Image (spheres, rainbow, N blue to C red):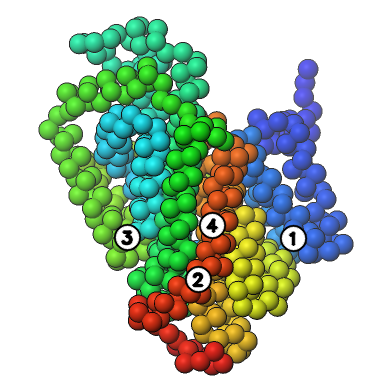
């Protein structure tokens, strides 16, 4: 039957997304102008919740299109301006550059990463030990690099593992002359093996993602808002680490213990083992590559290893913006590995650019939050408290808002408000320092609850790997839940019990600067 133009337009709208999803987005677009005429504040919160809905349904439809439509409508309604959105993007330019160049740089190092992690996977038979290794390594790397870079590395590794399995299972891979043939491999592989392998990789990805949060909170380079907070407080790398340690060290230990318990007792869908047929495939594939590896391929691994050292040094010493170091990684690896054709370079950017565009839409939603002052009532309310209670409320408020929006935005908004309170003499410099710690830990720890809380989690959710592993928004929230509870409560207890006493001890040891001569004074730097 001949379609009408309206039917054709509707069919094309959001492509293969389910009808109920299309109707929900159309409903949002119709209702928002009415909400805006009633109350811009309510319309602002509605937009935030609608955008979270598009993130939650990322496997039904990539959030860029529906989220972008909602934002375009919001701009035309006057909920925010393109100038404010541009300002938000400018403020977060380092994150944009990181995504464009660093993720592409990691792509060109995948041979080395796959080589190293395959060896790790084969050697460590214990799943609990492997999970601790992934979580711990991600934490250490995130403390010196940044969480997004580390997640890009882990995604590259997991995609490599999956592609090896897929090639063998679909009969596209090598004949191993000395051992099994493809037919024998296929005989051993079952649908259950695939499901178990997906579960196994999902476990490792979530442990590693949590690890990036555990390490990312510790240092000023771990997360973008850490840099903002360190800059406002005038702390260097060492002072930042020491000031955070009364909270971050207990939380790190609690996080690793949680990893062990989840794996040991197979809770929250953790504890999936690597199927033996898949382990055999990976071992044979690794042996096959070792046997066939030419001198040129060895030279590529050597170059990638040297570039990896440069990457760690460059990021650890903060020699340049993260994205620019990523650009140097692209230039160095491609130059010395012989990748000089334009189309060969293009593949590296396929993973990150859709997410970069989505992040710009996200910054547009943040611009709506700012212009409509959606968080102002919460900030004003928290500032009415005093002493330890105020620190706890700052920690919790930052955590809750970070779950809803973005920890970078929440952290920068709160530290700006606290800085203003210090300038106006409402709080002392010592109180400012304590609140800065509460803000940093509050934005970094409870925000693991949802993928929109941390850019690294959102990147994982919207990556090409997520649908392969059936890693949906709901599943990420469910698998992160035990970590969310443990990290939030241990962080809260540490803020209440440790922060004040440990900070006083650090003052006595002269490890950090005591900025105020007395509680009544509030001098700035």
Residue tagged 2: 499
Residue in the picture at 24% in, 55% down: 310
Number of the front mark, 3 or 1: 3
Q: Select label 2 or label 3 by which is in front.
A: 2
Q: Quadrant of residue 163?
A: top left
Q: Which residue is mark 1?
A: 44
Provide the residue designation for mark 3.
Answer: 315
Decide: is 282 above or below 521: above
Give the residue at x 63% y 63%.
396
Picture coordinates of residue 80, whole percent (x, y): 69, 65
Label 3 element class: helix
In space, the residues marked 2 and 3 are separated at their CA atoms by 29 Å
Of the image marks 2 and 3, the number of the one nearer the N terminus: 3
The secondary structure type at the circle numbered 1 is: helix
**Nearest the eye: 499 or 160:** 499
| Residue 284: % across, % down | 27, 20
Residue occupied by mark 4: 490
The quarter of the image holding the N terminus is top right
Residue 332 is at least partly visible in this image? no
């Amino acid at each position: 039957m001949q379609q009408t133009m309206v039917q054709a337009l509707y069919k094309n709208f959001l492509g293969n997304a389910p009808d109920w999803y299309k109707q929900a987005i159309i409903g949002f677009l119709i209702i928002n102008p009415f909400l805006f005429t009633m109350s811009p504040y309510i319309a602002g919160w509605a937009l935030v919740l609608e955008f979270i809905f598009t993130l939650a349904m990322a496997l039904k439809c990539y959030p860029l299109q529906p989220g972008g439509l909602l934002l375009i409508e919001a701009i035309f309604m006057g909920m925010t301006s393109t100038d404010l959105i541009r300002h938000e993007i400018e403020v977060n330019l380092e994150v944009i550059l990181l995504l464009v160049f660093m993720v592409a740089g990691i792509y060109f190092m995948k041979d080395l990463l796959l080589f190293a992690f395959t060896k790790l996977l084969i050697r460590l038979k214990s799943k609990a030990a492997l999970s601790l290794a992934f979580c711990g390594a991600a934490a250490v790397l995130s403390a010196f690099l940044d969480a997004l870079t580390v997640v890009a590395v882990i995604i590259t590794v997991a995609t490599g593992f999956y592609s090896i399995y897929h090639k063998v299972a679909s009969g596209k891979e090598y004949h191993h002359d000395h051992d099994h043939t493809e037919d024998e491999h296929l005989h051993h592989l079952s649908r259950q093996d695939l499901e178990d392998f997906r579960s196994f990789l999902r476990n490792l990805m979530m442990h590693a993602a949590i690890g990036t949060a555990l390490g990312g909170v510790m240092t000023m380079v771990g997360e973008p808002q850490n840099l903002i907070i360190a800059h406002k407080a005038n702390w260097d790398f060492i002072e930042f680490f020491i000031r955070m340690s009364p909270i971050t060290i207990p939380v790190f230990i609690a996080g690793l213990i949680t990893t062990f318990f989840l794996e040991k007792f197979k809770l929250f869908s953790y504890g999936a083992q690597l199927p033996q047929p898949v382990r055999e495939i990976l071992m044979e594939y690794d042996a096959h590559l070792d046997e066939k590896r030419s001198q040129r391929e060895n030279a590529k691994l050597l170059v990638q290893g040297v570039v990896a050292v440069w990457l760690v040094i460059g990021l650890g010493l903060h020699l340049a913006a993260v994205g620019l170091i990523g650009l140097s990684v692209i230039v160095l690896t491609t130059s010395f590995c012989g990748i000089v054709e334009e189309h060969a370079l293009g593949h590296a950017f396929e993973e990150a650019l859709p997410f970069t565009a989505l992040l710009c839409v996200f910054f547009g939603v943040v611009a709506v939050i700012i212009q409509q002052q959606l968080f102002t009532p919460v900030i004003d309310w928290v500032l009415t408290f005093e002493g330890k209670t105020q620190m706890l409320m700052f920690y919790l408020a930052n955590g809750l808002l970070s779950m809803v929006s973005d920890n970078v935005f929440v952290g920068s908004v709160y530290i700006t408000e606290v800085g203003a309170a210090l300038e106006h003499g409402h709080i002392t410099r010592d109180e400012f320092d304590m609140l800065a710690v509460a803000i940093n830990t509050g934005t970094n720890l409870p925000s693991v609850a949802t993928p929109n809380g941390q850019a690294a989690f959102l990147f994982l959710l919207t990556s090409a790997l997520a649908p392969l592993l059936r890693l949906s928004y709901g599943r990420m929230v469910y698998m992160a839940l035990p970590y969310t509870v443990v990290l939030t409560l241990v962080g809260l207890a540490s803020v209440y019990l440790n922060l004040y006493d440990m900070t006083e001890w650090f003052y006595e040891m002269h490890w950090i600067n005591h900025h105020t001569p007395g509680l009544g004074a509030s001098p700035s730097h």
